Image (tube, rainbow, N blue to C red):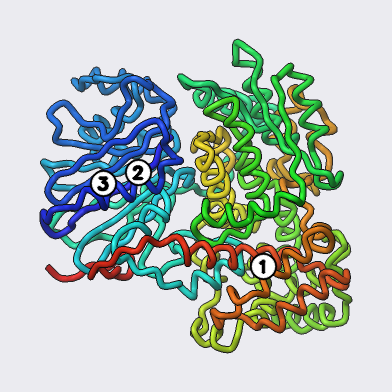
Amino acid sequence: MCGLAGIFDTRGQRPIDRTDVERMTNAVMHRGPDGAGMHLSPGTALGHRRLSIIDPAGGHQPMYNEDDTIAIVYNGEIYHFKDLVHELTALGHRFRTHCDTEVVIHAWEQWGVKCLDRLRGMFAFALWDERRQTLFIARDRLGEKPLYYSLLDDGTLIFGSELKALLTYPGLQTKLDMQAVEEYFAFGYVPEPRSIYRGIAKLPAAHYLEIRRGAPVPAPQPYWDVTFRERGGRSESEDCEELIALLRDSVKGQMVADVPLGAFLSGGVDSSGVVAMMAGIAPEHVNTFSISFGERAFDESRYADAMAKRYGTNHRSRRVDPDQFDLVDSLARIYDEPFGDSSALPTLRLSAMTREHVTVALSGDGGDELFAGYRRYLWHAREERVRRIVPAALRGPAFGALARLYPKLDWAPRAFRAKTTFQELALDALSGYFSSVSVVNDPMRNRLFSDRMRRDLQGYHAKSVLERHMGAAGTDDPLGQAQYVDLKTWLPGDILVKVDRASMACSLEVRVPLLDHRVVEWAASLPHGRRLKGREGKFILKRALEPYVSGDILYRPKQGFSVPLSKWFRGPLHDRLRAAITDATLGDTGMFDTGFIATLLDQHRSGVRDHAAVLWVLLGFAAFLRNAESARPAVTSSHRPLAVGAHSAD
């Protein structure tokens, strides 16, 4: 696992300052503490920081083909690279290393852009082809590995694994994108392709940029997608057998490493399944790691302990307490953008502990999105059945009136929060699902934002992010549509960002077996009832894992990997929280109603309302602003960024 950065003159061969590239790669040194390298030629610079996983002695980057006409900087793992080595060798290619990076070079030589169809793994890379005068940048199918880029008005393209690499570039403007701010407060993260800054973008998952020097810079192009289309004709037992075979093969492929390896073990269904598969493959005891909390309602450690005991793993656990609140500012430095998922804090602690013992860890992320594990899927499917029966002309007035009459019960389980259900039933499917995934809902954002902020948005609404994806799922099944939206937004924008930044901040590589694209495509072909059966999410995954994981783990109520914010914000953290979000940091932006923020704090502390979620995203935004103010180096230039994807005339 590594960090990469680069500078490319899209118009010609202007000299590139070596120190610019060094600053960019040094900014992501944590992603690759084992070595550094640079390719520098007229108009092209590729920088690299290496974390040695495969072929530590021979895998230095940038890496080249036989005649040095192709150079690559690469971040990721191609899990079946040995199979590709055999195939490409038979086609006449010669290999000088035992590293998966070299496979990408020869795959590009052999198949061009179509090489992406042959790669199975997680990756982000930049490849310079001297003969074709082409820069090729690509990202893996599910978005496990990140890549940011910006096209400047002088035709310079800069890119890097993290936003902090781009921010070192002289004169790069960092003006906040107000639409990205709206999206952050709606979702708790900034969905791709936006970043928090205008003119800087994330290359979307399963996309590439092929840029030929002297030609207009094209928009990113997709090379893969998943379609939720049911494939019938399989019995339940056949599905269970196929799924276990897929999981075992994916886990086996991702256990290949020349360094110590382990696994995250939360005690939930997905991580328990991954560890069970590992235990059946590994010749020695598996190393497992977990985080615990003092609050029993949030603590899954007893289930992790039970799994560790069953499979005889070398298990280690560490507790997260409120006194680690100071990590909030560390999170801002790690994530670069505002990030409102409070589980980033325990994920960082888990990664740090894990890195003390291993260099690679497997995780169970992705199971909820693939197999319908989130409770919101159940509610969305049920609500959509009602929407399709009751005409919209009746539904809006009737359910809207019920929502106004029903009391607001923030503290209650979803089944007893009928006000929320009535509000969503009054909406269409898209608006209803947006409401269910919103961290800060529409009425709350409307009160939170100042008049000036609402004017700056010019009517823009974060719902448009979901609208782009809802109709592309290839199904009219509400469950499949919701899962597809999450695979395009929540998974790459929140879950995978959280794990990548937290783990790489500790120089730990995390692999996600459930996101092997073969597993993803197989899960998307399941009938509705094999994913969500009655009230049971992840039905087929749980049935398949019954021989490997105990029923009290498989069929207990879902807890999720989160921290007890509500209690902490009313107790030991309240004064520090208030100080952090009522100082001048937020107020001076002119974006917020500071009086309403004070009201949120008072209502939460009194117990009248549970505002933990909105208070956390406010805290995250304030921490981001403080970090952004201090993070930029004092360098200047005439470079100014264009809107992403645009180009200026030659």
- Alpha carbon of mark 2 to alpha carbon of mark 1: how far? 34 Å
Query: Percent from the top left, x then y, of residue 473?
Result: 53, 55
Amino acid beneath label 1:
Ala
Considering only order in the chain, which callout, 1 or 2, is on the residue closer to the N terminus? 2
Nearer the observer: mark 2 or 3; the answer is 2
In front: 92, or 271?
Answer: 271
Considering only order in the chain, which callout, 1 or 3, is on the residue closer to the N terminus? 3
Which image quarter holds the N terminus? top left
Helix, strand or loop at mark 3: strand
- Alpha carbon of mark 3 to alpha carbon of mark 1: how far? 43 Å
- Alpha carbon of mark 2 to alpha carbon of mark 3: how far? 14 Å
How many numbered marks appear?
3
Query: Percent from the top left, x then y, of residue 634?
Result: 34, 64
Considering only order in the chain, which callout, 3 or 2, is on the residue closer to the N terminus? 2
Q: Which mark is residue 4?
A: 2
Amino acid beneath label 2:
Leu
Which residue is depicted at the point 59% across and 23% down?
A: 248
Helix, strand or loop at mark 2: strand
Q: Which mark is residue 136?
A: 3
Q: Disc 1 marks which residue?
A: 580
